[in-house]
Image (tube, grey):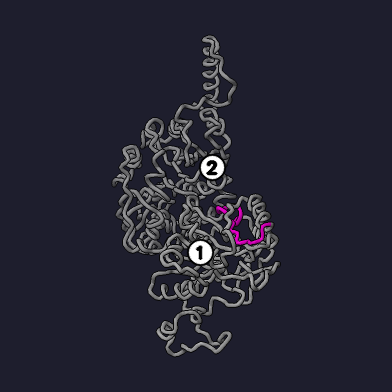
Amino acid sequence: MEINELEQLVKKLKSVLSQAETVLGNTPTETTSPTPTSADDVKRDYTIVTGLWNLKRNEELNDGRNFDEHYLKMFDEFLQMPMNLFIYVPKELEEFVKARRSEKNTFIKVLELEDLKNNLYAPFYEKTQAIRNNPEWLEITGEGGWLKTSPQAKLEWYNPVVMSKMFMLNDASIWNPFSSTHFYWLDAGIVNTVPSTHFKENLSLDNIIQATGDWIFLSWPYEAQDEIHGFKFDKMNEYAGTKVEYVCRGGFFGGHKAQLNKANDLYYSLLTRSLDEGLMGTEESIFAIMANLFPEQYRRYMLDDNGLIVKFTEALINNTVTLEAIPLFAQNRRKDILDFKLDTIKTNLYILTFNFPEQLQYTIDSMKKVPEWLEKPHLVLLDNSTDDQAKIKNQEIAAEYNFEYISLEGNKGICGGRQAAAEHFGKSDADYYFFFEDDMTSNPPDEEGKFCRNGLRKYIPNLYEILHKIMIKEDFDYLKMSFTEVYWDNDIQTSWYNVPQEVRTQYWPEYDKLPPNGSDPNAPRTNFNEIHNLDEVAYIDGEVTYTNWPMIMSKKGNQKVFLDTKWEHPYEQTWMSYVFQEQKEGNIKAAVLLASPIWHERIKYYKPEERREN
């Protein structure tokens, strides 16, 4: 049956149903799509992505897979699943989909094969065709081998389509019409080997996020000698860094949108490199390399030797999915921190102010130029003011910018306010916090391309998110946000001035005498460990001095620095000395950005006698 005939049949059936409902007194409301079932109304955090094109398979391979009788029949069943579907089809199949799906949970992206050639797969199309027609490649499986008559060899569009699945899935996550967190590719012909009831009635995929987490590849054991899907086996092993003993299915894969973005980048680079070297299998060859390279990121479920996906959907239904263990070599390897981990993170931001609402407003105005500071954390204003009018104005500012206002009931000093922030955070449900004094400002975007006196960047886009990602990745107790400070920079170990003499002698036996007054131009330098990089932002860990300058601090870091040991009248120098000694014992892990996006800008000055440490 041709597509037009199917569409005409659907229209006739709709007309008959409409007349029947009118006779029964149940006139339907006007709608352009079927009424959703109860399963349709389920809120789902994932989107299933698929696509279908007529690759002229039966005409070229004569394998009995007639497009209309085989693929469209399966696609018809596929479209009955109630999940959110993002569907790539050529224009000729658009109405076929619309006749079977509700607009509520369906997004159709018209994509012609020529669009693959000229856009999505454009960097790889000519290379793919050159390899496909290369006699040397065709002879990999020997005279009369399977490769010469395989789909990837005989069909012009087979590899451009299957090797674009990752790209199409990633693009769907960018359009994200259903505001999903997770995206999975599922072949449109999947019901050929998996009962459609697994999707329609058992709703197996509704368990997918809980069962698989960040990412899932479905693999099956594979013993290769010369090639895998046409990809030279020795080269696959070289790419993977180990012997490849399994292949990952292209019929179903995916995960969280952040992990998908990273997977897309890796896939793109591996595809580029392999095609440039004249190596080609299918998308499954590249997936196997990815899973072997980073098994801690690309988790797998092992299918039976036949590679049928039905084992996985049955396990989803029965809640018996067990992922392959992460190999020992990858268990302790640092992972990239994904954006989605930030979704569940809670952060407080404290500003300590004293007697000058104008100064507070000035700092808030600087943050408005980098609005993430005011939009993402829970804001807390700690008021040290002794001037009643200043306190009233501070309360008005707090209300305007949605700060929780806390009066410290008098001037508790800078360090008294710092301790108050630590104790408030310790009792809160937040995971991290920032502490700003009211003269610590955030450098705005117009500082892009400018540098501090140490030659470090003064502005970092997306700093708020990057700081959190670093903290999660490295598990630091605190991360200082600015390498360059007013009087000292973080390359100087200023704890040297403040530790007890016996500690100074212990750690600097050859240089343990303080100057009679002032600073020492030869003061010891900070012991650093390693320079790291995340999202193009560099940072360095080591014995990074504690100061009251803005930093992001974790719950356990706060506990170690401020709560496990308390001083009745703390000074900044006291904390500096204490933290240094704890670092030497290996109890506190700290770092500092190799950047200076925070600066000290005081526009209102109080009397010297009003300044208090505690």
Above-or-below relation of 443 to 139: below
Q: Secondary structure at mark 1?
A: helix
Closest to the observer: 13 or 214?
A: 214
Rounded to the nearest angstrom, the CA distance separating label 2 from label 1 is 41 Å
Q: Can residue 601 be found in the magenta stretch?
A: no
Quadrant housing residue 414: bottom right
Give the mark count: 2
**Crowd around label 2: few <14 · some 14–19 · many ≥20 (10 Å):** few
Report which residue position mark 2 lands on: 179
Q: Amino acid at mark 1?
A: Gln
Q: Is residue 106 above or below residue 258?
A: above
For discs 2 and 1, the disc positioned in front in the rendered view: 1
- Disc number for residue 419: 1
Return the x and y of residue 77 as percentages of the image width and height: 43, 31
**What residue do we see at 52% from left, 60% from top?**
421
Which is more toward the observer, 411 or 400?
Answer: 411
Looking at numbered disc 2 in the image, what kind of residue is underneath it?
Ser
Quarter holding the C terminus is bottom right
Name the residue rendered at 53%, 15% in the picture. 16
Q: Is residue 4 above or below residue 577?
A: above
Relative depth, front residue between 554 and 455 = 554
Decide if residue 506 is on the left or right side of residue 106: left
Judging depth in this view, the residue of 171 and 422 nearest the camera is 422
Q: Give neighbour class at mark 1: few <14, some 14-19, many 20+ (Cα, 10 Å).
A: many
Residue 64: image x %, image y %?
40, 35
Helix, strand or loop under label 2: loop
Q: Which residues are magenta?
A: 372-388
Residue 306 visible in the picture: yes
Looking at the picture, how far across and down is residue 68, in whole percent?
47, 31
Residue 379 lies in the magenta-colored region: yes
Please tell me which of labels 2 and 1 falls first in the chain: 2
Q: Is residue 445 visible?
A: no
